[in-house]
């Protein structure tokens, strides 16, 4: 889950993760979300990912304060963060 994808560094990070996952974990579905620079959207994105039953959450939070509760929710659900 990315806080925003409107910065070249974040885009490069996502592209690097996609490439690494394809090379090393071809059977894994990598789901990328873009919070669009809106913490409440990123929270909703993470809640949706949890509901989908993800096993791992990689997150680059827009703000610590807004995302900490939902990240704790993911961890409490047994999701590796």
Image (cartoon, rainbow, N blue to C red):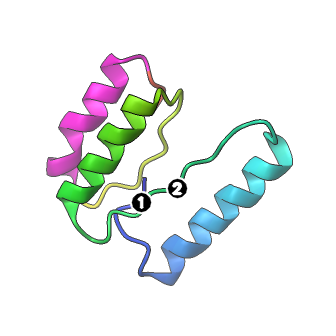
Instruction: Name the main secondary structure of what is drawn in magenta.
Output: helix
Position of residue 10 in the picture relative to residue 40 (left or right)? right
Q: Quadrant of residue 12?
A: bottom right
Which region is colored magenta?
Answer: 63-78
Magenta run includes residue 20 = no
Q: Position of residue 19 (x, y in %)?
A: 76, 59
Q: Position of residue 69 (x, y in %)?
A: 19, 35
| Outermost residue to the right | 23
Camera-nearest residue between 74 and 33: 33
Residues at discs 2 and 1 in contact (Cβ within 8 Å): yes
Magenta run includes residue 77 = yes
As measured in the structure, the alpha-carbon distance from the residue carrying label 2 to the one carrying label 1 is: 7 Å
Label 2 sits on a secondary structure element that is: loop
Position of residue 11 in the picture relative to residue 23 (left or right)? left
Label whose residue precedes the other's in the sequence (2 or 1): 1
Label 1 sits on a secondary structure element that is: loop
Q: Position of residue 33 (x, y in %)?
A: 44, 57
Q: Position of residue 13 (x, y in %)?
A: 58, 66
Mark linked to residue 32: 2
Camera-nearest residue between 74 and 47: 47
Residue of label 1: 2
In percent of the image, x 40 and y 64: which residue is there? Answer: 34
Position of residue 53 in the picture relative to residue 77 (left or right)? right
Mark linked to residue 55: none
The relative height of residue 18 versus residue 46 in the rendered view (above or below) is below
């Amino acid at each position: 889950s990315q806080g925003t994808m409107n910065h070249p560094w974040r885009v490069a990070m996502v592209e690097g993760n996609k490439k690494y996952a394809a090379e090393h974990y071809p059977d894994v579905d990598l789901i990328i979300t873009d919070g669009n620079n809106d913490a409440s959207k990123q929270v909703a994105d993470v809640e949706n990912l949890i509901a989908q039953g993800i096993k791992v959450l990689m997150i680059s939070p827009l703000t610590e304060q807004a995302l900490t509760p939902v990240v704790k929710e993911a961890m409490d659900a047994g999701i590796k963060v």
